[in-house]
Amino acid sequence: MIDSRSEYLTPISIIRIMHDIHHAIQSLQNNLIVHGYIEASSVYVILSATRKEDEIIALLGQFINAQIFYNSFNDHSIQYPDLTDLREIDNVGFANLCDSLINYCQSQIEKEQCNHENPEIVDRWNTAQNS
């Protein structure tokens, strides 16, 4: 996700991605579902035709490790021994995803600052990369 369309990953779009994925995890957990594999590769980003930052949508996919905790009475007060531990795995995965997105955003900000402060260095770097 991060490498494939990096020109669309702005601070605003990253916040939107984190919001959408957080909402997806909450929805899953409210329905006693644990995703089990939250990483950048399990996030699908849909861009609008107008390519506006606020029109980006992030979806959570790759449910290969998902577990559903079901009870026939729809009683969410029933305790499942593994549910809390598995939810924690989703929470840690989401935290790591957010860290990756924030680090990416920070690196882009620093790169942009470098471009404005030292254009000669950037030109030399680009020339060296293309050689």
Image (spheres, helix red, strand yellow):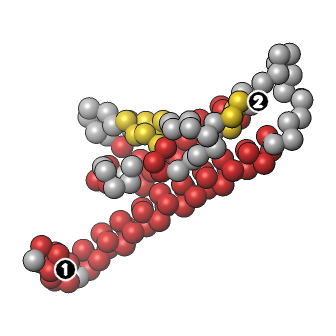
The answer to whether residue 25 is visible is: no
Per the image, the residue denoted by label 2 is: 69
Which of the pair 82/88 is nearer the observer?
82
Which of the pair 37/117 is nearer the observer?
37
The answer to whether residue 115 is visible is: yes
Residue located 54% across and 54% down the image? 97
Residue 102 point in image, percent of width and height = 49, 61
Residue located 43% across and 39% down the image? 44
- The span from disc 1 to disc 2 (Cα, nearest Å) is 53 Å
Above or below, 77 against 120 in this view is above
Q: Secondary structure at mark 2?
A: loop
Residue 25 point in image, percent of width and height = 63, 38
Q: Furthest residue to the front?
A: 64
Q: Amino acid at mark 2?
A: Phe
Binning the other alpha carbons within 10 Å of mark 1 as few (below 14), some (14 to 19) or many (20 upward) gives few
Q: Which mark is residue 125?
A: 1
Name the quadrant of the C terminus.
bottom left
Residue 81 point in image, percent of width and height = 86, 41
Q: Nearer the viewer, mark 1 or mark 2?
A: 2
Residue located 36% across and 43% down the image? 53
Q: Amino acid at mark 1?
A: Trp
Q: Secondary structure at mark 1?
A: helix
Which of the pair 109/69 is nearer the observer?
69
